Image (tube, rainbow, N blue to C red):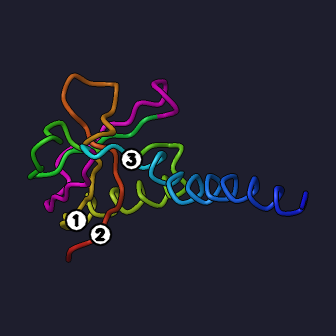
C-alpha cells in the first residue's frame, strides 16, 4: 500500500519537472522587439576606438535600415570579430558592396546615433 502512495505523490512532481523543462527555453528567449535588420551598400566610413570599450570598431554604409541610422558595430566579444572586421576592411578597400544584418535591440553605447550590433556580413560583389 505504501508503494501506491509513493507513485501517486511522484506523478505531480514529474509533471512539474516536465512542464519546467518544456517552458524553460521560453524564459530565456530574446525580447520580442529585437529584430535583425539588413542593409546593403558600400562602406563609406570606418571608425576605430582603441581606448573605448574593448577596442570598439564601427562603420557606416551608403544605406542603412530604420533603427540603425548611425551604422553598425561588431562586438569585440563576438567569436568572429576579427574575421568580420577583415571582411569590412576588405570591402572598403575594394569598393565592394556588402550586406549587413544588424540587431536593432543591441545598440552601441558609444554614440547618440543608433549603431546596430552586427549579426552577419556578406560580400555582394
From the viewer's perspective, is the residue at label 1 or at label 3 nearer?
3
Please name the residue shown 49% across and 34% down the image: 55
Q: Nearer the viewer, residue 98 or 120?
A: 120
Task: Give the class, few, some or many, for how many residues have Cα within 10 Å of label 1's Cα (few <14, many ≥20).
Answer: many
Please name the residue shown 22% across and 64% down the image: 99
Prevailing secondary structure of the magenta residues: strand
Q: Nearer the viewer, residue 2 or 32?
A: 2
Q: Nearer the viewer, residue 83 or 11?
A: 11
CA distance for labels 3 and 2? 24 Å
Of callouts 1 and 3, the N-terminal one: 3
Q: Position of residue 80 (x, y in %)?
A: 50, 58
Above or below residue 77? Residue 96 is: below
Q: Position of residue 70 (x, y in %)?
A: 18, 36
| Highlighted range, magenta | 34-55
CA distance for labels 1 and 2? 5 Å
At mark 1, the secondary structure is strand
The residue under label 1 is 98
Above or below residue 119? Residue 68 is: above
Q: Is residue 47 left or right of residue 124?
A: right
Amino acid at each position: 500500500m505504501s508503494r501506491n502512495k509513493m507513485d501517486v505523490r511522484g506523478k505531480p512532481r514529474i509533471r512539474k519537472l516536465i512542464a519546467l523543462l518544456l517552458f524553460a527555453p521560453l524564459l530565456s528567449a530574446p525580447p520580442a522587439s529585437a529584430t535583425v535588420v539588413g542593409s546593403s551598400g558600400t562602406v563609406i566610413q570606418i571608425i576605430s576606438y582603441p581606448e573605448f570599450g574593448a577596442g570598439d570598431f564601427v562603420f557606416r554604409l551608403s544605406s542603412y535600415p530604420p533603427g540603425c541610422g548611425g551604422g553598425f558595430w561588431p562586438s569585440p566579444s563576438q567569436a568572429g570579430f576579427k574575421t568580420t572586421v577583415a571582411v569590412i576592411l576588405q570591402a572598403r578597400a575594394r569598393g565592394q558592396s556588402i550586406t549587413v544584418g544588424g540587431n536593432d535591440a543591441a545598440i552601441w553605447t558609444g554614440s547618440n546615433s543608433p549603431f546596430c550590433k552586427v549579426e552577419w556580413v556578406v560580400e555582394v560583389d
